[in-house]
Image: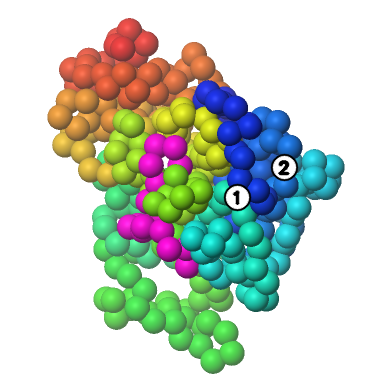
Amino acid sequence: MRTGPRAGGRICCVAELTTTGPIVIIGSGMAGGNAAATLREEGFPGPVVLISKEPGVPFGRPPLSKTYLRSEENLEGWYVRPAGWYADHDVELRSGPAVTAVDPAAHTVTLDSGEKLGYAKILIATGGRNMGFIGCEVAASLTQLGVQVTTVFPGRAPLERVLGGQVGELIGASHRAKGVELRPGDQVTAFEGTERVEAFVTATGDRFPCDFAVAGIGIEPDIPDAGVAQENGILTDELCRASAPDVYAAGDVANQLHPLFGRVRVEHYNNAEKHGRAAARSMLGSTAPYDYLYTFWSDQYEHKIEYVGHVTSWDDFVFRGSVAEAKLIGFYLVDGVVRAAVGLDRGGDPELDLDGEMAACARLVSARARPAPAVLADDRTDLWSLS
Ligand SMILES: Cc1cc2nc3c(=O)[nH]c(=O)nc-3n(C[C@H](O)[C@H](O)[C@H](O)COP(=O)(O)OP(=O)(O)OC[C@H]3O[C@@H](n4cnc5c(N)ncnc54)[C@H](O)[C@@H]3O)c2cc1C
């Protein structure tokens, strides 16, 4: 299972939380589950209520498009805490009800049953609907299961918007090599069928018979009516605080103010884990800003993509390694500064392989390093020497 170093953070004192009522967490995904665990680990003795409309205990979703989908593993290894942990640690896990509204003035939440609960502090960790990299991952997993897959996407290459054209082309080539039919620059405009989907039609007018369809089209933050400022998610400051008192947000739903990257909303497992933990510490009085250097990964066939940093547009992309072998490290530069890096079957996990090249890239990003592009591209230069 993927874990990373715990986000640092100074805890002022648990006693600072003096208001009465429980800490309520809405959403029992990675962010919500880790927040509950962190509250207890940091010694918060008061009531904690974890509410989620989803059944079961908090777990990580990455295997849903990979190993679990291919029946290669169950989800237990991805539980945030073992199923019995919540009762053992006096965390009230309320699975089933959806929160329909948060009233920051009254410090109450309303459930879809009409029940109202009071809170001292509340964390909104409601994630989002649907997801991005999933299209490629599910295409890979289904192909591995022997399904004939057709993938439709805008742009010239899969994941071009996130990783750029050159890396996207390499990912596209790996799918083609496995037999996936790629339809770049197109989009699905209609599904056809009576009892079930039988075909899809694209903007070019082509019609493709199909047995089922998977939409992996990005997420939309799932925000309950909470009376807090929003723009592409719930706007939070560096301490995970939303615009209303005692309301916090973390994970995919939060558009956070990051000390290095500015306003960012990311949709990744590693961030949700660390962000939930940071929000819990902030609720307990920590004044340490949430400055986690984002990383994420994706598995497709035998290939591994690792990414560190954050960038939505860049003015230069350079790489070291081999395009022919599709083994490389790519650097995304803005005004000469390394803002992000991607490792395609090279460089290791930036959080786990601490001597690896992707870990060196993490250091370059956090140092706002400005190495000459030619030096970055030159395999003879040790990346660790550049920051
Ligand atoms: C199939 C799949 C594969 C993925 N693979 C990867 C990967 O390889 N690498 C990676 O970095 N990331 C991956 N991700 C993304 C990662 O899982 C998410 O970034 C992470 O789950 C976000 O955690 P979260 O806690 O913010 O939200 P979520 O995990 O979405 O949890 C939100 C919870 O809130 C609940 N909720 C929503 N609204 C309400 C409400 N009104 N009332 C009560 N409960 C509510 C939901 O039911 C849910 O339980 C994947 C995601 C999916 C779906």
Whether residue 17 sits left or right of residue 306 in the image: it is right
Report the colour scheme.
Answer: rainbow
Q: Secondary structure at mark 2?
A: loop
Q: How far across and how far down the image is residue 105, in percent? A: 49, 60
Which residue in the rendered view is the most extreme toward the bottom? 194
Give the distance between the C-alpha atoms of the residues marked 1 and 2, in whole angstroms.
10 Å
Inspect the image, locate mark 2, and give the three-letter code of the amino acid beneath it: Gly
Left or right position of 368 against 109? left
Which residue is under mark 1? 120
In this picture, is 108 found above or below 315? below
Task: Check if mark 1's residue and mark 2's residue have beta carbons within 8 Å.
Answer: yes
**Which contiguous range is marked in magenta?**
224-240
Tell me: residue 265, above or below residue 367.
Answer: below
149 within the magenta span: no
> Which residue is found at the position 37% from the left and 11% from the top?
384
Q: Is residue 314 visible?
A: yes
Q: Position of residue 106 (x, y in %)?
A: 54, 62
Residue placed under numbered mark 2 in the picture: 46
Binning the other alpha carbons within 10 Å of mark 1 as few (below 14), some (14 to 19) or many (20 upward) gives many
Picture quarter with the N terminus:
top right
Three-letter code, disc 1: Ala
Residue 171 in view, yes or no: no
Task: Choose the circle earlier in sequence order: 1 or 2.
Answer: 2
Position in image of residue 331 (x %, y %): 29, 29
The total of numbered circles placed on residues is 2
Identify the main secondary structure in magenta.
loop
Q: Quadrant of the C terminus?
A: top left
Above or below residue 196? Residue 110 is: above
Is residue 227 highlighted in magenta? yes
Residue at 80% of width from left, 45% of height from top? Answer: 90
